Image (cartoon, rainbow, N blue to C red):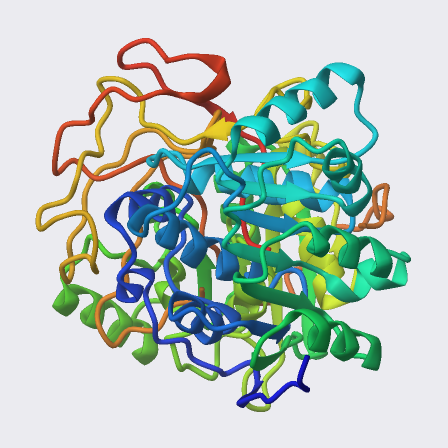
């Protein structure tokens, strides 16, 4: 095969980088947009902006991007859109994602559950270390065909050698964390898997680093690839970062406590959901704090008025969704509070980056519930720093220990893989087709309620999708154990986004198949999802 000839897009991503693309601007199929809405995704990360359009155009990609930059969504979203809108054989494996570990396979599978919930696209994670019953389930799925297969190399080779895996119709191959796979000795395994695949396919290679061995692999499997380099940003060292591990009901009282400890000049509180903004704004207002709110349900002139008051110091505390994590340009914010843990490392960096700007110092506090611990551990890994876990005052009562665990396998409470997941809406639920057809971008400013999300489970929390007005920016293994006790001392600075609940209500949901677990009763909701997306 000829050497790589690339169009190199070098993208150095700094703290003040502004992303301008809302997910509605990619022209995704409407069913896919319902899943994106339900996961709480608002604005594309840099890797998503750089990668999605070339994948939609059919280009091979070699991308340098770390976990936590949103790379999982960067490749699964365009692949799902193409599966929804282009002909493919449902009795074949149509897309294969090869990953180095079972943990990453499970994580991607869980992300897919939420995104695929309003589609008929099927997916399954295939990895080693499971029992014979699960192997039989995997065999059945691979024999009958599955749209998206996530697999580890060793387990995949075992199935391929038995001759029943339907790969003749495969159209998309993804190698995720390719450098790690090579470090683990999977080079020959990858080439062996590829020998079973059709030559005509789209290839996507993602790697945190680009050593010579990765480029050698790329020359063997990619065709005239586009090369994209995404450098992860890191928080400024002068930001004091602390986290408080709490139960959800403790969040509002803790915000009030922190804000009452000293006189802050300017405080920005980021919430993942519109409902959280409303509740926190109301509670702070009742306690006579000088507070304003910003979210997409307010008219543009209302948002501009609140922001003007905040800039001028007439409002000291601003509670907002992620539409402000990149879009606000104020140099004297001395405290940022992440009321909810951000989706990924990029969002975290941009949220807390609103403080300690120019020559000022600042503080960022993050509130972590039990359900958000895995997410925050991944953020710590991405930024290369363990964030100090401050002690919550005894008056607030018992608090959870910080003990993030490996994510449970996709789709079942027991953590066991129960077979291929297939998207589908709950009977009697909302989320039929949007006005204007099944594909193309959403009309400007459109909003609505969602109900239900996430494959077998629904992402936790309630609320509506936060949509960014045109021209408004948005933000888009861990250390075990508890840090040494330390009293709260508000140095100061932080925001986040979180999953929502389902599709829009522009139509009537049609009854659909719901995968191996069987159809849900009318009006029922899926079980809560323990793990959110962004990889």
Residue under the image location 53 percent in, 58 percent down = 337
Q: How many marks?
A: 0
Q: Is residue 204 above or below residue 454?
A: below
Quadrant into which the C terminus falls: bottom right
Q: Nearer the viewer, residue 425 or 172?
A: 172
Residue under the image location 80 percent in, 19 percent down = 131
Left or right: 259, with 126 as reference point: left
Q: Position of residue 452 (x, y in %)?
A: 34, 29
Q: Is residue 35 above or below residue 331?
A: above
Quadrant into which the N terminus falls: bottom right
Q: Position of residue 266 (x, y in %)?
A: 45, 71
Left or right: 303, with 465 as reference point: left
Q: Position of residue 262 (x, y in %)?
A: 56, 62
Q: Nearer the viewer, residue 20 or 48?
A: 48
Is residue 466 at least partly visible in the picture?
yes
Q: Residue furthest left?
A: 436
Left or right: 158, with 425 as reference point: right
Residue 116 sits in quarter: top left
Is residue 494 at least partly visible in the picture?
no
Left or right: 170, with 477 as reference point: left
Q: Residue furthest top?
A: 521
Residue under the image location 28 percent in, 43 percent down = 31
Q: Nearer the viewer, residue 43 or 516?
A: 516
Q: Is residue 464 above or below residue 325?
A: above
Q: Nearer the viewer, residue 71 or 121?
A: 121
Q: Position of residue 263 (x, y in %)?
A: 51, 66
């Amino acid at each position: 095969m000829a050497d790589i000839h690339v169009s190199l897009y070098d993208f150095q991503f700094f703290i003040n980088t502004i992303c301008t693309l809302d997910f509605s601007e990619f022209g995704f199929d409407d069913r896919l947009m319902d899943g994106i809405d339900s996961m709480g995704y608002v604005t594309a990360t840099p890797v998503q902006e750089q990668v999605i359009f070339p994948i939609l155009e059919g280009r091979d990609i070699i991308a340098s991007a770390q976990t936590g930059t949103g790379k999982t969504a960067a490749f699964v979203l365009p692949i799902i859109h193409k599966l929804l809108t282009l002909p493919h054989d449902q009795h074949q494996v149509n897309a294969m994602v090869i990953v180095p570990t079972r943990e990453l396979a499970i994580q991607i599978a869980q992300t897919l559950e939420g995104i695929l919930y309003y589609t008929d696209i099927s997916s399954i994670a295939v990895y080693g270390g499971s029992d014979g019953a699960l192997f039989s389930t995997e065999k059945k799925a691979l024999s009958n065909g599955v749209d998206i297969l996530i697999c580890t190399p060793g387990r995949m080779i075992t199935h391929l050698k038995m001759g029943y895996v339907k790969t003749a119709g495969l159209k998309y191959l993804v190698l995720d964390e390719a450098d790690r796979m090579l470090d683990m000795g999977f080079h020959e395994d990858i080439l062996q898997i590829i020998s079973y695949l059709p030559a005509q396919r789209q290839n996507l290679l993602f790697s945190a680093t680009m050593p010579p061995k990765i480029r050698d692999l790329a020359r063997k499997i990619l065709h005239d690839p586009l090369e994209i380099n995404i450098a992860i940003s890191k928080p400024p060292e002068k930001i004091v970062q602390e986290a408080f591990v709490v139960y959800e009901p403790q969040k509002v009282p803790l915000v009030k406590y922190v804000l009452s400890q000293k006189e802050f000049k300017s405080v920005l509180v980021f919430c993942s959901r519109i409902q959280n903004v409303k509740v926190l704004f109301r509670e702070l207002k009742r306690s006579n704090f000088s507070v304003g709110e910003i979210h997409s349900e307010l008219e543009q002139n209302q948002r501009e008025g609140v922001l003007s008051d905040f800039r001028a110091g007439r409002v000291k505390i601003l509670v907002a969704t992620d539409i402000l994590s990149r879009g606000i340009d104020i140099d004297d914010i001395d405290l940022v509070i992440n009321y909810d843990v951000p989706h990924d490392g990029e969002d975290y960096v941009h949220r807390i980056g609103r403080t300690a700007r120019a020559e000022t110092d600042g503080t960022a506090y993050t509130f972590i519930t039990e359900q958000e611990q895995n997410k925050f551990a991944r953020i710590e890994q991405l930024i290369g720093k363990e964030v100090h876990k401050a002690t919550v005052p005894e008056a607030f009562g018992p608090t959870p220990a910080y003990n993030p665990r490996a994510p449970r396998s996709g789709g079942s409470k027991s953590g066991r893989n129960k077979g291929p997941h297939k998207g589908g809406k709950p009977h009697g639920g909302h989320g039929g087709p949007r006005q204007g057809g099944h594909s193309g971008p959403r009309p400007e400013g459109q909003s609505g309620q969602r109900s239900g999300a996430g494959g077998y489970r629904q992402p936790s929390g309630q609320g509506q999708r936060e949509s960014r007005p045109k021209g408004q920016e948005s933000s888009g293994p861990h250390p075990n154990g508890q840090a040494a006790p330390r009293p709260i001392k508000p140095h100061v600075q932080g925001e986040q986004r979180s999953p929502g609940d389902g599709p829009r209500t522009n139509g009537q949901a049609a009854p659909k198949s719901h995968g191996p677990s069987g159809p849900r009763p009318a009006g029922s909701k899926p079980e809560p999802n323990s793990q959110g997306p962004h990889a």
